[in-house]
Amino acid sequence: MYIPQLEDLGDVKGKTVLVRCDFNVPVTRNNTGELEIVDDFRIRSSIPTLKWLVDRGARVIACSHIGRPHGKYDPDLTIAPMAKRLHEILPDVEVMENLRFSKGEEDNDEAYVRELIKGVDLYVDDAFGAAHRNHASIVGPPKYLRSAAGRLMAKEAEVLSSLLEAPARPFVGIMGGSKVSDKMGLIQALLDKVDKMIVGGGMAFTFLAAAGHSVGNSLVEPDQFEMCKELMVSSDKIVLPIDYVALDSDGRFGREERTGSSRVFGGDIPDGWKGLDVGPDSVKVFDEIIASAKTVLWNGPLGVCEDPRFSAGTQAVATAVANFGGFSVVGGGDSAAALEQMGLADRISHLSTGGGASLEFLENGDLPGLKALRESPSQA
Ligand code: AMP
């Protein structure tokens, strides 16, 4: 699947280039009420593309969405702090205000697209995190302008395509997170590609309950039982936990409230107890599978990792993925945060910035933003 690259734009000197970036980073108000950026990773990630264009003499206009203002101005969602941070690193880039202050952006309105590209010669999409959206700034400009993927976009697409097309085997998927319903489509699609699929986190309990285990008060989605059963019958690739760390019925868990006592159970969980992490025997099984892999794709925590009583499973998997020696791809905020906290992030071959976009790409093999670039009629 060829996606046009920056080099395909031809000579950019003197040209006006609109670059769709992903500056959707967390901000907070400081003591004096000023908006401050919490984490500028996405802004820094846009620099290679912007700098490439600036260095070659282009006039560069960067644009992005921030949050969900739904077509109205919202002072908390202005792009000003992102523009300020960007200008500290790269001053020579113009920055447009939050695209979603205009209703036309999310509506993919044609008149808005024309407005956006007025006076613009070329278009570059470097917003992989938004590439699953059919929004004006993503799918609109390639219809009219010569277009290319920025460096970040191209890298994400290349790595994720390689997983789907020719992964080194054994290829092990590790899925975690809260609800199986959120990731059922992805699990189904990946079962065709992987050799083994480890399922942990809250979603494992729906599989376990569907297989006839008692899971106490653990998170289950009964409307997913049939699908889980079908997958377990048709595929022998799914690996479920065999023991769990559970919290008693009065206990509270999470980032702030932490009460009650926890215990490890094997096989079944008694009434009243809630499974919130995978247990030590499961970790041993998972470790062995990961150690024998050549490719690993990990998305989502194996337990409630924001509570230290239930973070051991996620930490063990993070360590195994950092150490197994093959090609590793990690997506999703919680898994990436666990690796960063443990100082292991630089041992991962590719940390995806994409979130929802990465999952949708892995499920469907394509994204509206990539399709728009490939099908741009203006490619020479
Ligand atoms: P997701 O947004 O689907 O990737 O899920 C991430 C969330 O799943 C985290 O906030 C975890 O606290 C939560 N989670 C992980 N394991 C469990 C579990 N066993 N029960 C309930 N929630 C869980």
Image: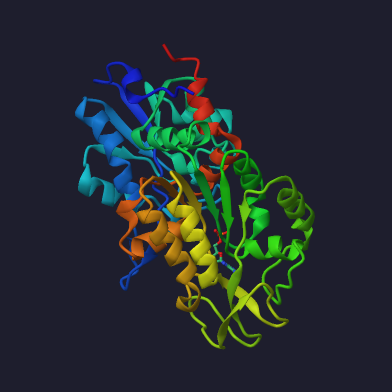
Dividing the picture into quarters, in which one does residue 150 lie? top left
Q: How many marks?
A: 0
- Comparing 240 with 344, the one in front is 240
Q: Position of residue 261 (x, y in %)?
A: 56, 88
Above or below — where is 251 with respect to 215? below
Dividing the picture into quarters, in which one does residue 106 lie? top right
Is residue 184 visible in this depiction of the protein? yes
Left/right placement of residue 195 relative to residue 354 reads: right
- Comparing 75 with 137, the one in front is 137
Protein image colouring: rainbow
Above or below — where is 53 with respect to 333? above
Is residue 112 visible in this depiction of the protein? no
- Comparing 105 with 277, the one in front is 277
For the point 66% across and 44% down, the residue is: 188
For the point 30% across and 52% down, the residue is: 346
Ligand 1 rendered quadrant? bottom right
Above or below — where is 272 with respect to 235? below
Q: Quadrant of the C terminus?
A: top left
For the point 55% across and 45% down, the residue is: 359
For the point 70% across and 81% down, the residue is: 270
Q: Position of residue 305 (x, y in %)?
A: 48, 69
